[in-house]
Amino acid sequence: MQVQIAPTVRVIKVGTLRLQPTETPGPLTLQCKTALGIGGGSTVTLVSGSRRLLVDTGFDFEEDTSPENRAHNARALLCALQLASLSPEDVNVVFITHWHRDHVGNLWLFPRAQWLVSQPLHARLNDGRFSAVADGEELMPGVHVMLSPGHTPDHASLVVMSTIAGLAARIAVAGDAVLSHSTFAFGRLSLSGERHSDRALALESMKRIAHSADLIVPGHGVPFASFRPDWLASQSP
């Protein structure tokens, strides 16, 4: 009888935020963050099981579409892969949570991988290079799709049944359905809300993820243990 090994989750590149919930928006703050190299790119996560699956590809300073910034972002991700002893050719699948450049800008580095997006996003893209996945679909043993609309109408996350320190753990690779630990703790959907297509749906998706995971890998920033802050404490699963 073959024993099924739980998939592993590894953050290979930690995303950043141009602004935290406690910071006051303004040109000086943004200029300082830019000077420090904080570009707002997404977290990039590797899920390894029967296949090697990369969640989002990251892209810092998404408003800068110059060849120089494109090359800079490619080098940064290639370096992150190298530190994980991988090359782009070692990645079998790339799962894109949603179609914002800070999450998808480096996708072109993986021409040999299968590109997966949610069914609603697939219909909108109408691009034969992508394959559609449905809510609840198993991408490989222990890895399931969770539709998490709100940030965009077609946003999707993954829930991975893994282990941490020898203990079973449900890990949500959330994309921007959970932007960061700080926004989750403050009950904020984003820094200002303008990028959410539907704030009510976004809030429901964040609640669903919180109740479905022991550990959350947010779209930007480090993973954190799922908890019930004040805004969520009265909500039922």
Image (cartoon, rainbow, N blue to C red):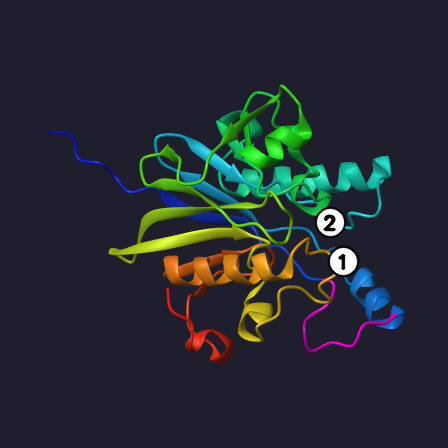
Question: Is residue 91 in sight in this rendering?
Answer: no
Image spot of residue 47 (x, y percent): 43, 41
Magenta run includes residue 24:
yes
Q: Which residues lie in the magenta part?
A: 18-26
Q: Are marks 2 and 1 in contact (CB under 8 Å)?
A: yes
Residue 60 — which label? 2
Quadrant (top left, top right, bottom left, bottom right) of the C terminus: bottom left
For residue 221, side relative to residue 17 (left or right): left
Residue placed under numbered mark 1 in the picture: 37
| Residue at 73% across, 67% down | 192
Question: Is residue 222 in sight in this rendering?
Answer: yes
Residue type, mark 2 in image:
Asp
Q: Nearer the viewer, residue 34 or 195?
A: 195
Location of residue 74 (image quadrant) = top right
| Residue at 63% across, 19% down | 128
Tag nearer the camera, 2 or 1: 2
| Residue at 70% across, 47% down | 102
- Which badge, 2 or 1, comes first in the chain's sequence? 1
10 Å crowding of disc 1: few (<14), some (14-19), many (20+): few
Image spot of residue 216 (x, y percent): 46, 59
Residue type, mark 1 in image:
Gly
Gap in angstroms between the C-alphas marked 2 and 1: 9 Å
In what element is the residue under mark 1? Answer: loop
